[in-house]
Image (spheres, grey):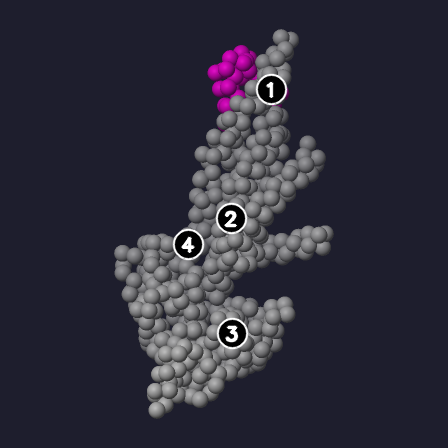
């Protein structure tokens, strides 16, 4: 379990995170939702340790991120996988080299074992074998996201972080990516933390949903509760469009 | 402005401390080094050869014009051309050209990696991006820039000889013998020392500007331009300092 206690983060005079307490459950898809600028990405990067927080702690199964020594931090990093918003594949490496990079650094596998693991991960995200030698720029946005997922899971991480993994994708591909992340989470028993402002994702894969507004947690619950809760913060976030408001009123009747 | 300069200088040395941390996995660094040699070194050969050839030709024409005297043997023109090319044109001008070509490439590549979160991806994996991305580039520049400068020297001399021959400006036999007269090997080592220092400046200054980019594509472009300006200033400054110390 990842336990976040009172984290605050500012950039100059701009207070982005204003004290967030939340528990992120193992083996579940934990979704962080909120409008653009609500602090989702900064929250995710703070939990990952990419941003140092001004105050508060992040605890990974009892290990407090800031208190670990260099080797312990390195070991923890190997338990993390991350899918970035823009995929963040290395342009100078082929698809299989991208996926194999963490293995080259941190595994003691033989070349054959590495090759098998790379093939398994890429096939798991449905990348065809003939695309393995291609460069990232030769793939579509959806395929790049799938390769990024394969790279994130190649070391069999305990924690998977995804920053708006379906942004910029068409609705159909977005659903495919969502489903893939959901399936992988349950298949490998990972703790997945996913940032999104896409309500489709929330309703498809959100086992545990946390709403952030202006750097604060304003609500958390299950995806089923998102549509039925009377919590003002959620209602204002989810039912912003007139169509959704009418649907909600119709459901209420 | 002075405060900003020293702040930048401090950040540069902290960046170097990050770069020169012990590599996590030598084999990966070696692979990356080979890629950089190809990208930064081999791809610059044609440009350096072309420029050096014509640079040598121009130096010969100008020297021959200025030393057009019946009491002065053509071998003296050859000595002047050789010294100009070996001491200054090859190491400094070629390094300035490489600062533009290789340096801007390094700055924009690293800047793009920064803004597209590729560096964050490395950090999440537990890999030190400064070391993994920059150290192979420094090694490639330190290895290949001297080779390019030696090419530059040789082709500059060939360019001078060809121009003299084709334009009938000198007696080619006398001119050629001049290339070997009063030759001090120390001048070549002086040039190569300068080239090593310039190569280090090119790789680290451009990497520093690229690594520290914040923002988007516009900032990457600005960082690339700033890095070329900073490299040019630093190279010219160190050219003076090294010449004063070594010669």
The Cα–Cα distance between marks 3 and 4, rounded to whole angstroms, is: 30 Å
Q: How dense is the environment of label 1, judged by Cα within 10 Å: few (below 14), some, or many (20 and up)? A: some
Residue at mark 3 shares a chain with residue at mark 2: no
Can you give x and y, in whole percent of width and height, for residue A110 in the image?
Answer: 36, 61
Q: Work out whether A86 lies above or below B55.
A: below
- Labels 3 & 4 near each other (Cβ < 8 A): no
The Cα–Cα distance between marks 1 and 3, rounded to whole angstroms, is: 68 Å
Q: Work out whether B107 lies above or below A250.
A: above
Q: Quadrant of the C terminus of chain B?
A: top right
Q: Indicate the secondary structure of the residue bearing disc 1.
A: helix
According to the image, label 2 marks what residue?
B106
Nearest to N terminus: mark 1 or mark 2 = 1
Chain where mark 2 sits: B
Q: Residue at x 47, y 59 (%)?
A: B116
According to the image, label 1 marks what residue?
B63
Q: Is residue A194 left or right of residue A179?
A: right
The reply to whether residue B24 is in sight is: no
The Cα–Cα distance between marks 4 and 2, rounded to whole angstroms, is: 14 Å
Magenta stretch prevailing secondary structure: helix
Q: Is residue B180 left or right of residue A163?
A: right
Q: Indicate the secondary structure of the residue bearing disc 4.
A: loop
According to the image, label 4 marks what residue?
A91
Q: Nearer the viewer, residue A43 or A219?
A: A219
Question: Magenta span covers which residues?
Answer: B154-183
According to the image, label 3 marks what residue?
A38
Q: Indicate the secondary structure of the residue bearing disc 3.
A: loop
Nearest to N terminus: mark 3 or mark 4 = 3
Q: Nearer the viewer, residue A109 or B138?
A: B138
Chain where mark 3 sits: A
Q: Is residue B247 left or right of residue A140?
A: right
């Amino acid at each position: 379990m990842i336990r976040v206690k009172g984290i605050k983060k500012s950039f100059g005079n701009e207070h982005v995170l204003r004290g967030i307490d939340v528990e992120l459950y193992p083996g579940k898809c934990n979704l962080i939702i909120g409008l653009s600028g609500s602090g989702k990405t900064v929250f995710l990067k703070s939990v990952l340790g990419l941003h140092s927080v001004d105050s508060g702690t992040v605890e990974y199964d009892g290990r407090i991120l800031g208190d670990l020594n260099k080797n312990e931090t390195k070991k923890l990093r190997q338990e993390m996988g991350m899918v970035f918003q823009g995929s963040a594949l290395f342009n100078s490496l082929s698809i299989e080299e991208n996926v194999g990079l963490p293995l080259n650094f941190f595994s003691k596998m033989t070349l054959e074992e590495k090759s098998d693991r790379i093939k398994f991960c890429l096939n798991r995200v449905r990348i065809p074998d003939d695309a393995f030698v291609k460069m990232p720029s030769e793939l579509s946005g959806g395929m790049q996201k799938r390769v990024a997922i394969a790279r994130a899971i190649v070391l069999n991480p305990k924690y998977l972080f995804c920053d708006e993994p379906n942004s910029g994708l068409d609705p159909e591909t977005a659903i495919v990516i969502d489903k893939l992340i959901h399936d992988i989470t349950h298949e490998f028993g990972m703790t997945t933390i996913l940032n999104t402002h896409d309500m489709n994702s929330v309703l498809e894969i959100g086992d545990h949903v946390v709403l952030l507004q202006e750097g604060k947690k304003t609500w958390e619950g299950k995806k089923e509760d998102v549509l039925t809760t009377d919590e003002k913060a959620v209602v204002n976030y989810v039912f912003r469009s007139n169509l959704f408001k009418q649907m909600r009123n119709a459901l209420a009747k | 402005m002075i405060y900003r300069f020293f702040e930048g200088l401090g950040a540069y040395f902290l960046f170097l401390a990050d770069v020169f941390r012990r590599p996590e996995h030598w084999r990966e660094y070696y692979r990356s080094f080979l890629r950089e040699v190809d990208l930064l070194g081999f791809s610059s050969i044609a440009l350096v050869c072309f420029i050096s050839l014509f640079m040598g030709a121009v130096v010969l024409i100008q020297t021959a014009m200025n030393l057009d005297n019946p009491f002065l043997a053509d071998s003296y023109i050859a000595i002047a051309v050789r010294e100009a090319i070996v001491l200054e044109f090859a190491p400094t001008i070629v390094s300035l050209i490489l600062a533009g070509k290789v340096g801007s490439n390094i700055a924009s590549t690293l800047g793009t990696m920064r803004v597209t979160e590729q560096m964050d991806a490395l950090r999440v994996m537990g890999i030190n991006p400064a070391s993994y991305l920059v150290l192979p580039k420094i090694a490639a520049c330190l290895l290949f820039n001297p080779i390019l400068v030696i090419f530059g020297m040789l082709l500059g001399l060939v360019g001078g000889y060809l121009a003299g021959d084709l334009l009938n400006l000198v007696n080619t036999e006398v001119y050629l013998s001049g290339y070997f007269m009063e030759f001090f090997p120390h001048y070549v080592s002086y040039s190569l020392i300068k080239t090593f220092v310039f190569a280090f400046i090119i790789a680290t200054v451009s990497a520093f500007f690229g690594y520290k980019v914040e923002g988007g594509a516009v900032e990457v472009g600005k960082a690339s331009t700033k890095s070329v300006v900073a490299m040019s200033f630093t190279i010219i400054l160190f050219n003076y300092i090294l010449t004063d110390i070594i010669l």
